[in-house]
Image: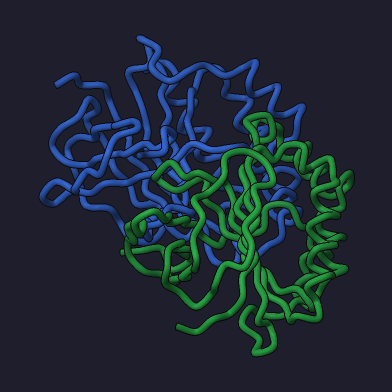
Chain colours: A green, B blue
Amino acid sequence: MLNQRLHSFVGGDKGDWSVVAMTTVVGEPLAPVARVAMVAGEGDHSPPAGGWVLRGVTSNERYAAHREAMQMKSSQAPLGRPEATHGALIPIRKSAAWWALSQDERRELFEETSRHISIGLRYLPAIARRLHHCRDLATAEPFDFITLFDYSPDNAAAFDDLVADLRATAEWAYVDREVDLRLARAPS
Amino acid sequence: MLNQRLHSFVGGDKGDWSVVAMTTVVGEPLAPVARVAMVAGEGDHSPPAGGWVLRGVTSNERYAAHREAMQMKSSQAPLGRPEATHGALIPIRKSAAWWALSQDERRELFEETSRHISIGLRYLPAIARRLHHCRDLATAEPFDFITLFDYSPDNAAAFDDLVADLRATAEWAYVDREVDLRLARAPS
């Protein structure tokens, strides 16, 4: 029986999102694909020829304090709004140095130093997002996190600002692999 | 390829640990078994007839602050000391209410209120332990955490005190399933 919080992202030539751009920000690239299919709570998907499968589970908050979590909850929009025809899938991996830090050191870098939550809040509700954790799956995964975003075409420039803001932080110095896929809804 | 931090605990009639006692502390019991086999970084194990397989991954610290993590690191002993012929395997699950709390609320319950880290430190290095996380595996697991302990016969009473101290905390009010297996090394 599968974890109902499991999501699979299948890169190949099928799926409701077409890949309009794919950039390797740091580390190894991913094989280029034309489309991404997103599957919730389903069984194993083998990678299509020349493609890949990324998997992750949604989980509890790791860093947000109560007030921050409430602010996010009250401001955020769900994925899948009809006008949110643009999207992004951004898998990242963090270094061993990050994971060796204690919880308070990671929290301090994440928010007090890097303002990860505060930056994200500035783009709510325009940018919707869902974070998936991959590091504690039973299989060795190529990334630690996968974040899926969607937004209207009007907010494409704001999305560029959001990722640029985050990549300029001290937290991002611990990101040792990141690929940025920009998507457009393209029902098959 | 498997996560190298994956550990499987196979309850049946094989394995290097015999089960000398099994108590359901709260929630559903586990099927009674004679032995537990522990397997690191290996593939899928089907449950033996009438038995079970519990799986989890070791991972980064979730609550310990830097000073606490350093104290644990400098005081703790590794599993598998020759004199540590007694053991315990304690899988627990926490309620949805726990997981809905923000990080700072969970930390406060865990340490400032319940002294989980401080209690544990009192029993180092006598009691060795390893914590495994199950909640974010791709499969739906019956528990959120599995902790494996080992200690010398001299420290069996201290181990009883440790678990009694933890079960009396406010944190433990969020534990909705817990089974306590006491083990003795019994090479097959």
B10 sits left or right of A3 in the view: left
Q: Residue, x 78% and y 57% (percent of image)?
A: A163
B120 sits left or right of A187 in the view: right
Which quadrant holds the N terminus of chain B? top left
Frontmost residue, A69 versus B49: A69
Q: Residue, x 74% and y 50% (percent of image)?
A: B108
Q: Position of residue A77 (x, y in %)?
A: 72, 80
Quadrant in which residue A149 is drawn: bottom right
Q: In the picture shown, does residue A138 fall above or below A88?
A: above
Q: Position of residue A11 (x, y in %)?
A: 46, 61
Q: Position of residue B71 (x, y in %)?
A: 69, 22
Which quadrant holds the C terminus of chain B? top left
Quadrant in which residue B28 is drawn: bottom left
Quadrant in which residue B61 is drawn: top right
On the question of residue A3 being in view, the answer is yes
Q: Position of residue A118 (x, y in %)?
A: 87, 60
Q: Residue furthest left?
A: B49
Frontmost residue, A130 versus A11: A11
